[in-house]
Amino acid sequence: MWATYLYKASLWLAPALVASFVAFGFGFVFFESLPFLRSVDWSGTLSVKWFPSDESYGLIALMSGTVFVVVCALVISLPIAFGAAIELAFFVHGPLRSACLGAVGWFAGVPAVVVGLFGLVYVVPALGNWFGQGFGLAAASIVLLMILVPPTVLQLTETLQAETEGPLLAARSLGLSQARAVWKVVLPAKTFALAQSAMLAASRGVAETLAILMVAGNVVNLPVSFFESFRTINATIALEMPYALDVHRSSLFFLGLLTFVLVWLLRWMSGAFKKRPGLS
Amino acid sequence: MSLRWKHIYCGFESSLGRFTLGVVMSLTLVGISKADTKKDRQKVLITGSSTLAPLMTTLATEYEKKHPNVQIDVQTGGSSKGIADCRKGLNDVGMISRSLKASESAVESISVASDGLAFIAHGGLTVNDLTPEQIADIYRAKVSNWKELGGPDLAITPVSKAEGRAALELFKKYFKLKSSEIKAGVIVGDEAHGVKTVASTKGSIGFVSVTTAMQATSVQKQSVVKSVKVAGASPTAADLRSGAYPYSRKLQLVKCRDLRKAVKEFVDFALSAEGQKVVERVGYIPL
Amino acid sequence: MVAALDEWRLQKTSGFIMKFFSAVALCTVLAIFCLVLAPLGSELTNALKWSYLTGVPSDLGRTGGVGPVVKSTLVLLIMSIFMTVVLGLPVAIRLAESTNIFLRSMVDILAGTPSIVFGLLGHALFVQFMELGYSLLSGALTLTCMMLPYFVRVAEDALREVPRRFRLVSASLGLSSHRYFFRVVLPLVKQALLTGIILSWMRAAAETAALLFTAGYSLRSIQGLGILESGRPLSVHIFELSMNIANADDMAFRGAALLLMISFAFLILLRLPGAILKGKSLLTDGLVDKGKVPNEQ
């Protein structure tokens, strides 16, 4: 029937469209960064100086900016996200749980711009009062925490509850308390899910541009202190792209390429955690 | 089989539901795309500087009220994009907030509003007046504490703008600094970003357009930012016009070819007395 | 005997520590967000006034309403969700049926691409190359690409839950594949698909950078609904008010409150049929409750 043909056609058409968009995307970014790749002095890229108007394209500061902020954000947000997810999955029940889940789900919809604005108007001055300068890794990590935690909690709560009923019931019936059962029986089997969650959060962190831009300070520096301005790759692209010409513009596309590489790296790392699915 | 509500809600399960859903969606999409495409509508596309964009948007709205068959779209992207698009024929006029470079000769500029470079500082700062040399030294990090300038014992945080921004180019030109010499504490992007950054950091000083500075310091509750006089002259419309405040620039439109009638009429409106009244009303400085 | 008591105490203590830690984590999450929402909360009532929702912005957006912005946002919403589902379902089916590393990597790359790169890509592909110009259609297409991985992930998980034997049984009964999908699979995964839609919308609703270069910045008093028209989405409006226009903070927060309310309304709306017809909950999705995990007593 024509309906089946339509269905079967869409089954390869849609993936083809998606794949071609990604291929186009990658090709476009690569193509646009060619002028930079052709003319760059590679020894110069290993420095901290990013002054495109003076032909100096040091990448170290930018890359470390992105990496550091994601790592710091993960260090503070993963424990909170995991804790909250465990609490919601196994310890809270009834209407309280529905309310909490609804609230967290709603929080996940707060725009990054608003979180960044909140950071700029409240967090930065507060940090400035206590520690000297507000802009920097600390503020950016806090802002990133607020962006990463809700979706991670939501997704993790759901993942933790998948296929858990059986083992959990068994453990409880053997006399373990809920906490003990969760800690000893459920969680060890879910390490893959936890790792995957962490990797998802990391990719989201790498992809975030605007909110970090507002509170990071954006000076091209090695982020050695929590309260010194720094800059991420995405912020550089966002700030400089509208005004960049020729080689400078091309170098920004190269930065985009670097982000692709980072994401691939994260994917590959999450694959290393993989076990055979299903509880042992 | 008669159509019931459940066929729509649980649509996909029944073929009648799917059919109805498909029809509804197609009609909606067609309706949406057909809506409002008047055949004789003239379209004008203006791209460029984000500093000038709010003003042009307002002018466009005012103009459209009187000329309903003209549709003016304003897009941002930066001064350089305004010029590049103009050259490639991708827009009707461009907006720029810096002066044309020598390499950009095939382009003609039309001034729309006056503006300049203003310095703002955190509201709590007691220093009100600085000399150009002092400002240059602050940004070179030769002076790093306000007490060296007669102020409190507070570290100075210079706020600068991202590479390529028109305001930065203006700053470098007037104060004779190179990019590598500027040691900023924080770098910002758009105008209000700068204002908020200065407002939230004690001891900070930054530069924005005169228009923004005027707007930011005019409302009482926003008095966490104040404008800084340079050699006695304040960044106000009066001082700019008299020349007492020297750091001026014009906000301009650029054209690369003869304008179509609709576009020309809009530009004429922007430059007319009525248009300039609009300019003043929204807080910009008329010519 | 004493050893058993010690063991019990150890269990009790470690159990208590764990519960305490998790509870603290949850409370921290909730507290942080109440903090963030506080400035928005004061603007909430203002955001819901009819004059604000349908009015026209004036004085650069510092006064007036956001009517045209809301229109653009809703059109973008409808279009991008439609396209996400239509494109995402086949992709999810493909991924659920066979391990297709290539396709999976493609989807993951989409998930990890920064918004600014999407903006540049969307601009190059839809605005310039396909000559759609700055339009809601370009914006919707770009949004679809951003939303796709989130929807596909959820949809794929849900599709995997469907037991394989259903496929065999339906084939043996003579059902063609498309019949099988629409009549057997879809009713089972509907709830999950709704979750996927909501999740992917959350990602896209707040998207600013990508939309600025595709759907555009243009703000007109009479915003048509034409999809080839440029229109300013709410997220771009919030960005403009907070980053480019001085003294517009309260309006920026008001816009953000409105965006949150739109998301909330959308959430409730999608769950409404389920809640009314089948008694499912309005706030949470059924998936999370389905574990029926035993509780404390």
Image: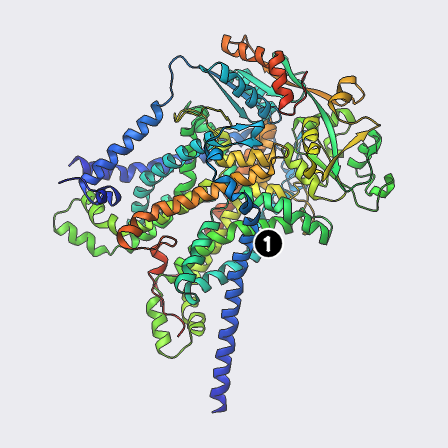
Q: In the figure, residue C80 lies in which quadrant?
A: top left
Residue occupying image coordinates x 85% and y 41%: B151
Image color mode = rainbow
Q: Give the chain of mark 1.
A: A
Location of mark 1 (residue): A72
Residue C5 relative to residue B274: left or right: left
User: In this image, B21 relative to C40: left or right?
Assistant: left
Rendered residue at 33%/39% (across/down): C87
Q: Residue furthest bottom?
A: C1
Quadrant housing the C terminus of chain B: top right
Between A63 and B149, the residue placed more toward the observer is B149
Residue B54 found in image quarter: top right
Q: Is residue A118 above or below residue B65?
A: below
Element class at badge 1: helix
Residue C32: % across, % down = 56, 54
Q: Is residue B10 left or right of residue A149?
A: left
Q: Nearer the viewer, residue B244 or C133?
A: B244
Q: Residue at x 31, y 43 (%)?
A: C89
Please name the amino acid that badge 1 sits on: Cys
Pick the front one: B272 or A205: B272
Vertically, is B200 above or below A169?
above
Residue B49 appears anywhere in the view: yes
How packed is label 1: few (under 14 Cα within 10 Å), some, or many (20 or more)? some
Q: Quadrant of the N terminus of chain B?
A: top left
Across and down, in percent, residue A185 comes to 41, 71
Q: Position of residue C102 (x, y in %)?
A: 37, 44
In this rendering, position of residue C25 left or right of residue B7: right
Q: Would residue B90 be visible to someone looking at this image?
A: no
